[in-house]
Amino acid sequence: DAGVIQSPRHEVTEMGQEVTLRCKPISGHDYLFWYRQTMMRGLELLIYFNNNVPIDDSGMPEDRFSAKMPNASFSTLKIQPSEPRDSAVYFCASSPPGQGTATQYFGPGTRLTVL
Amino acid sequence: GIQVEQSPPDLILQEGANSTLRCNFSDSVNNLQWFHQNPWGQLINLFYIPSGTKQNGRLSATTVATERYSLLYISSSQTTDSGVYFCAGPWRNNRLAFGKGNQVVVIP
């Protein structure tokens, strides 16, 4: 199995631009999580999906952030407009049926820098 | 929300040494996990350990749920053990609350 795939691995953009991060979960997994990691706040859960349906988006910082999961093999996290304080590493993780948060497999992350 | 405290925050080990990392929770947990983030940023799930003891090679973990803590043991440390170790416990719904991590550096 290829594991969780994220793209791009690195993204540098200017303030005000739209940023789209992509994630392909492990085949057969029905939970998908988006996390953000910063030095100040550590690892934070932004949103998670179960069977492509958003279950809890209370961690999404503000309306500039949105996430979608149009099918079981693809999810996007979009920031529009981006701000310097959005600079962080964004991780996607997935877990198998029946596991919920019990066993999460993380992708390599996307390092976002907003200038 | 649940508070997760990890200690020590930083640890430098000579290769071959043993160490213990600790994770305390402010509330009872039933789904505690340990992760390792290597120096390249990759996060790996080490243990899912709601209670009791589990071992995986040189690593083992013990959770005492009634006392709200978990321990991660690293024996005969190797340079590849370097990185940050996170513990995490469930909050509401399926959310995980992460500690700030234990930064471990193993020197040859």
Image (cartoon, helix red, strand yellow):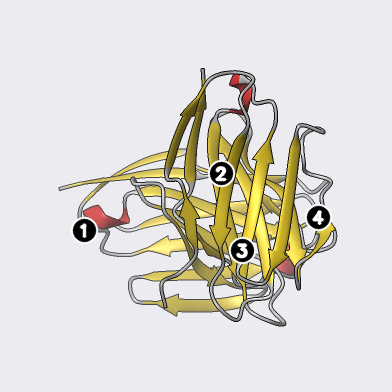
Work out how far the residue at label 2 is from the one at label 4, CA to CA, in angstroms: 28 Å
Instruction: Indicate the quadrant where residue B48 lies.
Output: bottom right
Relative to A45, B108 lies left or right: left
- Nearer the viewer's eye, disc 2 or disc 4? 2
The residue under the point 47% across, 50% down is A7
Circle 1: residue type: Gly
Which residue position is annotated with label 2? A90
Output the chain of dot 2.
A
Pointer 2 or 3: first along the chain: 3
The residue under the point 73% across, 54% down is A68
- Above or below residue A6? Residue A105 is below
Q: Mark 2: which secondary structure?
A: strand
Relative to B103, A82 lies left or right: right
Work out how far the residue at label 1 is from the one at label 2, CA to CA, in angstroms: 34 Å
Instruction: Indicate the quadrant where residue A62 lies.
Output: top right
Circle 4: residue type: Asp
Provide residue B95's location: percent of width, then percent of height: 76, 57
Work out how far the residue at label 1 is from the one at label 3, CA to CA, in angstroms: 43 Å
Work out how far the residue at label 1 is from the one at label 4, CA to CA, in angstroms: 35 Å
Mark 3 and mark 2 in contact (Cβ < 8 Å)? no
Point out which mark residue A74 bears: 3
Residues tagged by mark 1 and mark 4 found on one chain of the structure:
yes
Point out which mark residue B16 bears: 1
Work out how far the residue at label 4 is from the one at label 3, CA to CA, in angstroms: 35 Å
The residue under the point 32% across, 58% down is B18
Which residue position is annotated with label 4? B27
